[in-house]
Image: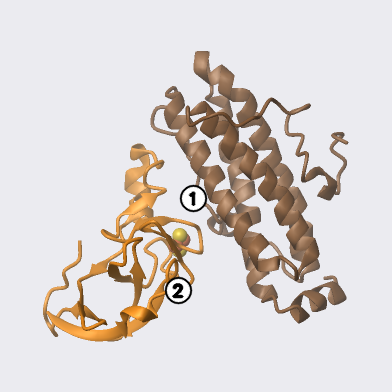
Amino acid sequence: MAKVAREMVEKSGVNVDELVAKLVRAASAEFTTYYYYTLLRAHAIGFEGEGLKEIIEDARLEDRNHFEALFPRIYELGGDLPRDIRDFSDMAACADAYLPDNPNDARQLLGVLVEAERCAIRVYTEICDMTFGKDHRTYELALAILNEEIEHEAWFSEFLGEGPSGHFRRGTPGESPYTSRFLVVPNGHN
Amino acid sequence: MQYLAVAYTRDIPAGRVYPVLVGGRELILVRDGQDNVYALDGLCPHRHLPLAGAEVWKGVLECPWHHFQYDVRTGENLYPRRVYPAQLAARLGDHVRPLRIYPVRTVDEQIQVGMPEAGGTPRFP
Ligand code: FES
């Protein structure tokens, strides 16, 4: 635990235990989404699926990066992750992104993806609201992740025909343009 | 059915829930976007956690714990029900149960919630 770092956050009026609980639920959502997006990407096949595959892959790898970027902050603030992965996955801040009944239906697939991103946007907006002007490090981290989740939503929503996202493509898969600076392990995306 | 006075209309904040204890039951009062007030169970059916910190936007209530969403008028689960596979319904059905709703009437700015008389049957969906 980073003792003084936690103390400063407490002094600023943030309920640190509540914040840590939110970060753990967010980390769980990233971890479980990474798993579910693996299935969704694997099933993105055929004419429409092939087009979707690349953005699912970016979102999938970036969600894994979000987990990687989040967990050190949990420990710094005196929190920890559950010993049992089943307990951990049950805590996820968002519903499971299950493979739809008909994975060959791109609209069904996209429905799951876009809703998962929308949930993530709500989660990180909440953390940003809670930490803004108080816990600068968590705020910056949550904001970086929020930037990427917003992009993910826009990609999937564009594919659903809800309008342009302005997105072109990542330089490399799962580049995490906002979150990569928080990653401890170099990802070669500098 | 007996109606119990639980709050004044001015107590219910826009976009937030107003928790009340009625007959030993935790309920929440919420507004939809049009000043109608609704009374719903105060515990989310997903993991039975309190909805006290939930947000309401355009008639949709969002649980603060795992962000499940409910229609405040009917209590129906909107998300994740709309993306959960029907094939897993037997296992996931419990996760997407509706929120119980209670009848509400407003008398002179006073919000009254209808509760079953002792021994009566609750009017739940
Ligand atoms: S307890 Fe409400 S969404 Fe999980």
State the hue of chain B.
Answer: orange
Give me the C-alpha separation between circle 2 and circle 1.
20 Å
Q: Is residue B98 left or right of residue A5?
A: left
Answer whether labels 2 and 1 touch (C-beta < 8 Å).
Answer: no
**Chain of the residue where label 1 is placed in the rendered structure:** A
Mark 2 falls on what kind of element?
loop
* Position in image of residue B5 (x %, y %): 24, 86
Residue type at tag 2: Ala
Q: Is mark 1 within 8 Å of ligand 1?
A: yes
Q: Residue placed farthest to the top in the image?
A: A47
Q: Is residue A82 visible?
A: no
Q: Residue A145 vs residue B29: left or right?
A: right
The quadrant the C terminus of chain B occupies is bottom left
Residue that badge 1 annotates? A95
Q: Which residue is mark 2?
A: B52
In the rendered image of this protein, which colour is used for chain A? brown
Q: Is mark 2 within 8 Å of ligand 1?
A: no
Quadrant location, ligand no. 1: bottom left
Picture residue at 62% right of the left edge, 64% below the top: A22
